Image (cartoon, grey):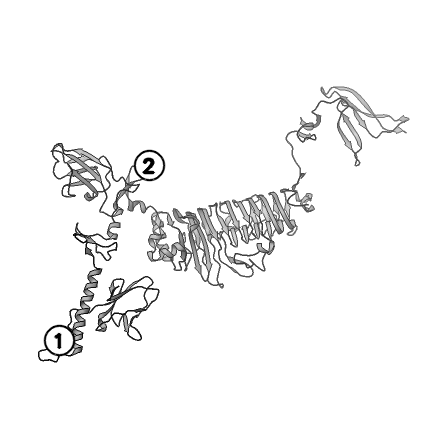
Amino acid sequence: MANTYVDYTATAAQTDFAFNFNYLEDSHVVVEIDGIDKTLTTDYTIVTSPSKKVVLTSGATAGQLVRVKRVSDFGTDLVDFVNGSVLNEADLDKAYQHNRYLNEEAAEGNNDSMQTVGGGTDFNAESKKIVNLATPTLSTDAANKSYIDDRVALASSNLNGFDKSTHTGDNTNTEFTLSFTSQTTTAEAYLVTIDGVVQTPTTAYSVNTTTNKIIFTSAPPTSASIVVVPIGTTSSANDATVVATGSTTSRSLASRFADVVNVLDYIPSTYHASILDGTIDTDLFSYINSAWTDALADGKSMYFPSGTYLSKSNNFPIGRVNGAVPTSLLDCKNITLFGDGRSTILKTKTATGADVLQINGAKNFHVRDLSVTSELTGSSGAGSNCVSITNGGDNITFENVFAYNAAYVDKTTYLDGGKGFTIQTGTPTVALGKILFSNCIVEGCTYGFDFTPVYSYLINQNPSICIDNCITENCWYGFLVNAGASTTVLPAGWSIGTKFSGMANNCQHGITLGRAHGVDVDVKVFTNKTKANLKLDPTGSAWSSALNTDVVGADFEYAHNSKINITGYLNDVDRKIKVGGANPGSSGLSGATDSCDLYFDIGGTAITDIELINSGGNRVRKSVVYISSTTASSVDALFYLPAYDNTIIYGSNLRLINPKIHDDLNFTETDGVNSYVNIQKSGFGAFVQQTGASGGTNKNFGVKDNSGNNEFVVYNNGEVAFNVSASASAVGAISHVVYLRNPTTDAITGYIPVYSSFTP
């Protein structure tokens, strides 16, 4: 146990450190923290009652190494004896103690120092680290870890290290072609021997990577055995070169790493740990902005390693045009923003709302393999969307992106923000073109996938918007097209070029089309929660206490020229399907759901299976509607009204409007396969034919009354039978005759007289 010092590992903010050694002067009590001596009175004070301790002016950091030690100052005499002076006990004791303390300190200092091994000449560190070691300058200097880490051995799997090239000297040649590919000109990176004698780098030889040769200062002797082995490099790892698989050109590691902008390279390392564990609460906007600026300038993709990246002041600076309505699309040069899947999280945390990724008036931009979310610290401003595409855009793709728990604000008449993915066209002067979301998932957001078009702008565009194989879960609205009433005339048959395919799981509203033109929908809706729970957001509060409080699987209010396929199972909902009309505005078109293919096959239970929406008489018209018997126990009679001109398929029942049949119409037997009777077109006529073997008296065609009695029959042999006849005692004059023709040759074979009158 030491007598002249005491060691501590500090706890967080610790100030008091006790000691029990004796000392002569206060200045002899020294506090050392992490190897650095502190200053008495400035950094610490000494307290002697009731026990001895030092008190730090500022508390130590957890984990710091603190030593309280006695340094008795050998350079100062505490007692100066003068001839003829009186020797008293106190001075003698003080002089003795000073010498004693100095010897104690020297002895313990010597014991703690690095000693040579007993009987040997080598130093023994006794398995302890040597700290604060300077960078070496001479070949015989000790090297610190930082210096070694900056040197790379060429043994990693992508470097051609630890090969061997052998040669034979001839006392003439000084240059020899190496059998391996040299990767550095640093001579120290190669172990070279001649007849077993190690050669001195640079002095005895050099290496030319261009010619791949070793060059000796003097020609090796005749028959000398020359061995060259690459062992490492004393240059920076950045200088090491590699040849990528499939390539023939070597490049430095620095060059290869620069192919992609790694966002962590722009963020101080002090934040890396909290980014990784998700506890980051520092605004990283400026660092991310620097990374984006470099990526955009060089057309390089941006990589966000696993962790949480937080912007507390604004949207992420990705694909932005100063947040203003652009006059041209920003060319993002096909940059891909990517991460490590769900473990990479981009997040905004603001008081007044900020979308995480706001792609405003941009083109040629791609995002994949990461998560997006937002948080609000206030409720008086706007909400925050995960991803918003605003004011046009083209060639924008999102793949395998997870958007969740976007923060929103209830504005009473609408919910602000909180959307997973939203396209808001606005009315810019730039184009809206190709936008793709594939294999994306939205969870716990107001709207999963939202498209809010302005038709006065979109009528002059050629959009192609595809939401492919995407999933929404626990959202207020899963999929939504939400257009206002058109302020301009729209052409019949027009399309906004939009497609939805995916699933809406446990959403209060699965899919909704409000004034949608030319939209393809293939969505499965599913719920297994109670109706009450479907109305709750991720915090357990109602999405809205005033807006659209019903739970509805699919809602189509004014869909034109659309193909809609809805399947699934809904448990305990208000309505499985709502379909019908809405105000058409100035479109010049009907306000009904018009000219659509509608397919509904939804199991489960609902208060109302299908609600037909009436908007000023506009319901559903000129559409093919399939409703499975699983979907509804009955179909509203208004679907069938002739004025609406719908083709209705309900279960096994089919109602056709003005069908045109190209080929035969066949009637099957009880097996549902074989047919023995058909109606066929022949020339410009229609004929009934028995296609199975039958006798001449088999009934081929006829008329029944409302009770099912045969009133008129044509037999297979051409005979005709009537159920009604009258006897006549006398007849009038023949008014005309009816020709009888041969049905094969059309030749007249006889006449049937028609009398002008008869007497019963």
Q: Amino acid at mark 1?
A: Asp
Give percent across and percent down for residue 663: 64, 29
User: Which class describes the residues within 10 Å of circle 2: few (<14), some (14-19), or many (20+)?
Assistant: few
Q: Which mark is residue 246?
A: 2
Whether residue 736 is visible to the viewer of this picture, yes or no, is: yes
The mark total stands at 2
- Between tags 2 and 1, which lies in front? 1
Residue carrying label 1: 80
Q: Nearer the viewer, residue 699 or 65?
A: 65
Picture layout, residue 463 above or below residue 12: above
Side of 284 relative to 726 (left or right): left
| Earlier sequence position, callout 2 versus callout 1 | 1
Task: Choose top left, top right, bottom left or bottom right for residue 211.
Answer: top left
Whether residue 452 is visible to the viewer of this picture, yes or no, is: no
Task: Choose top left, top right, bottom left or bottom right for residue 155.
Answer: top left
- Secondary element type, mark 1: loop
Give percent across and percent down for residue 251: 28, 42
Q: Residue at x 69, y 46 (%)?
A: 637
Give percent across and percent down for residue 426: 49, 53
Q: Nearer the viewer, residue 653 or 161?
A: 161
Mark pair 2, 1: CA separation = 84 Å
Side of 447 relative to 99 (left or right): right
Q: Nearer the viewer, residue 758 or 604?
A: 604
Q: Nearer the viewer, residue 157 or 328?
A: 157
Q: Amino acid at mark 2?
A: Gly
Q: Residue at x 37, y 47 (%)?
A: 301
